[in-house]
């Protein structure tokens, strides 16, 4: 049989997130003249990596630990640890709402577990209020 794959691409903005949407068409035909076309739309997300610094000082800029595109992968679990490995904060599902209240300035570590992707993203980040 014969098949044709056609890709179309468009950029979409979801708030502050830029996502590419790819539409894939697969057309199949048999020697007997039967035909069928399948259309699938895939959204390609840029990154789920969090910031390397947050500044929770109330100015509404970098006040929260925000992971871009997280709303496309619910639910996710966030765990925040201090430099000694003590768990300071945990949220499931995490909704980009942690403001580091009652946590002093310094270096911390997060583990973001994305159930849908069966993936853990971890990194260090700094809290700086001044």
Image: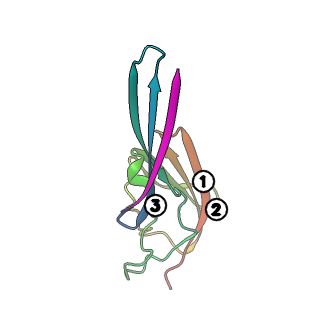
State the CA–CA distance, disc 1 to disc 2. Answer: 14 Å
**Residue drawn at (43%, 69%), measured in percent from left and top?**
102
Toward the left, the furthest residue is 15
**Residue drawn at (64%, 58%), measured in percent from left and top?**
84
Residue density around tag 1, few if under 14, some if 14–19, many if 20 or more, within 10 Å: some
Q: Does the magenta segment cover residue 128?
A: no
The residue that disc 1 covers is: 122
Instruction: Please tell me which of labels 3 and 2 falls first in the chain.
Output: 3
Element under disc 2: loop
Q: Does the magenta segment cover residue 5?
A: yes
Find residue 54 and report its horizontal and vertical position in percent: 50, 73
**Residue drawn at (39%, 68%), measured in percent from left and top?**
16
Find residue 82 and report its horizontal and vertical position in percent: 59, 61
Residue density around tag 2, few if under 14, some if 14–19, many if 20 or more, within 10 Å: few
Instruction: Please tell me which of labels 1 and 2 falls first in the chain.
Output: 2
Element under disc 3: loop
Element under disc 1: strand
The residue that disc 2 covers is: 83
Which label sits on residue 68?
A: 3
Answer above or below: position of 125 versus 7: below
State the CA–CA distance, disc 3 to disc 1. Answer: 14 Å
- What span is in magenta? 1-12
Q: Nearer the viewer, mark 3 or mark 2?
A: 3
State the CA–CA distance, disc 3 to disc 2. Answer: 25 Å
Q: Is residue 83 left or right of residue 12?
A: right
- Residue 43 visible in this rendered orientation of the protein: yes
Is the stretch drawn in magenta largely helix, strand or loop?
Answer: strand
């Amino acid at each position: 049989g014969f098949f044709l794959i056609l890709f179309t691409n468009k950029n979409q903005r979801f708030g502050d997130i830029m996502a590419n949407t790819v539409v894939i068409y697969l057309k199949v035909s048999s020697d007997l003249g039967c035909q069928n076309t399948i259309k699938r739309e895939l959204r390609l997300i840029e990154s789920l990596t969090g910031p390397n610094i947050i500044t929770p000082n109330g100015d509404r800029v970098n006040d929260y630990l925000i992971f871009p595109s997280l709303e496309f992968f619910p639910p996710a679990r966030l765990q925040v640890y201090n430099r000694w490995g003590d768990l300071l904060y945990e949220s499931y599902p995490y909704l980009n709402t942690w403001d580091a209240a009652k946590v002093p300035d310094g270096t911390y570590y997060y583990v973001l577990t994305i159930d849908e992707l069966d993936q853990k993203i971890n990194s260090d980040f700094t809290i700086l209020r001044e």
